[in-house]
Amino acid sequence: MIPNLTLVIQGLAFFAVVWLVMKFGWPHIIAAIEERQNKIAEGLSQAERARKQLADSDARVAEEIRKARAEAAAIIDKAHQQATQIVDKARQDAVVEATKQKAIAAADIEAQMHKAREELRGKVAALAVAGAEKILHREIDASAHRALIDQLAAEI
Amino acid sequence: MASEEAAGSVDMTGYIQHHLHHWQVPIGDSGSAFMTINVDTLLFTVVSAVVFMLLFVMLARRATSGVPGTLQSMVEAVVLFVDGLVKETFHGKSRMIAPLSLTLFGLIFFMNFLDLLPIDFVGWLWAGAHSAAGLDPAHAYMRIVPTADLNTTLGMALAVFLMTQYVGISEKGVGKFFAEFFTAPFHAEGAVGKILLSPANLLLRLIEEAVRPVSLSLRLFGNMYAGELIFVLIAVMTLGATLAHASTWFLGFGQIVAGFGWTAFHILIITLQAFIFMVLSIVYLSMAAESH
């Protein structure tokens, strides 16, 4: 039980083991642990960043969709307006054209009527003259009674 | 009957004494008791150190910062535990304290662990080797638990003592370190008071410094020695027993129960003692680093 030389050797051996652990063991293990801790921290912050980016792009996509929808609605509105305008214009044009055609036709009819009336009047005058001639059995001097005939024709 | 008992008791004493005898080799021929080496202690210290190194140093070289394996996780848990303990307690500059503490814990644990091997197993192999070599197996001494040898625990306690002084000097400087021998723990105002108190301070300091390695080494040694002795006593229950004798069956059963119980309990003791040795060393080193 009395301590002997072994204790000196044991003390030195202990220091040797401490030195080996300090030199070759401890730093590697601590380095590995710290590196892993850094990796984990980095991964967590990256995940956080990715999450934020995703939220950002989600918001942007929603905004884009909203804008596109508004634009489409505007385009449709405009198209409706244009269509209405075109239809209105076409209607107006048709009305104008119809009026014009009606006027032309009326004028034509008027002219025809006038012409026919003139013709008829001439014919009636001639008939009247011929009738009168027959009634009177005498020849009426057409030139002498021109004024009378014209007046007659005008009265018809 | 009486002679049988006498023979048995002699046998028992011899058995116990044989178990508590180191394989000693004298160095030189001074005949001094100090110039002796306990070869078995050194041998199994080397075995424990190799196991410890294989576990920690070899693993450290393969340590990955990726996903750690089971063994690496276990070692990392121990390393982080020791590191946390040291960071919490020790506020000095020295970077050596944490590896030193880890070595204390790991090495002592593995040395203590040898106590859990069946008490007669290695001795029986060694005696067999002796017989095979044509030597007397009665002189085949082999104690495999290095921490049950006062030399080991005292050697480590003195190593811690030296580290304590080294840390004290390197943290505080030589002047302050030696001045504190005379000015702490009792502080005085004025030169007269300081001179009056200095002998008391010096005496207390010397006692304190001397007691630490002694208590540190004796605590571990006492626990392990007692543990080993109880294993020996449990083994004695069926010493020289014959199957023909009825008591062998009772005692054999008792031995199994006692052996199992003490081994299970001893797992706690070996871990706890390694831990206590480490924690106290950290505390001593921290106290040395702090100014009074």
Image (tube, helix red, strand yellow):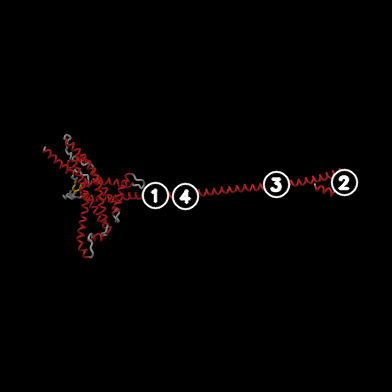
Residue at the left extreme of this rendering: B2
Who's the residue at 16% across and 35% down the image? Answer: B246
Q: Nearer the viewer, mark 4 or mark 1?
A: 4
For the residues bearing labels 4 and 3, Cβ distance under 8 angstroms: no
Q: Quadrant of the C terminus of chain B?
A: bottom left
Tell me which chain the residue with mark 4 is part of.
Answer: A
The Cα atoms of the two marked residues, 1 and 3, are separated by 86 Å
Question: Where is B245 relative to B227, above or below?
Answer: above
Tell me which chain the residue with mark 2 is part of.
Answer: A
Sequence-wise, which precedes: disc 4 or disc 3?
4
Sequence-wise, which precedes: disc 1 or disc 3?
1
Q: Nearer the viewer, mark 4 or mark 3?
A: 3
Sequence-wise, which precedes: disc 4 or disc 1?
1
**Residue A59: mark:** 4
Residue to which mark 2 is pinned? A140
Tell me which chain the residue with mark 3 is part of.
Answer: A
Q: Confirm whether residue B163 shows in the render.
A: no
Q: Are marks 1 and 3 on the same chain?
A: yes
Sequence-wise, which precedes: disc 4 or disc 2?
4
Q: Quadrant of residue B141?
A: top left
For the residues bearing labels 1 and 2, Cβ distance under 8 angstroms: no
Sequence-wise, which precedes: disc 3 or disc 2?
3
Tell which of B136 and A67 is nearer to you.
A67
x, y percent for residue B213: 22, 53
Crowding at dot 4, Cα within 10 Å, few <14 / some 14-19 / many 20+, comes out as few
Residue to which mark 3 is pinned? A102
**Amino acid type, label 1:** Leu
Residue to which mark 1 is pinned? A44
Q: Is A66 on the left or on the right of B291, as rendered?
A: right
Number of numbered tags placed on the structure image: 4
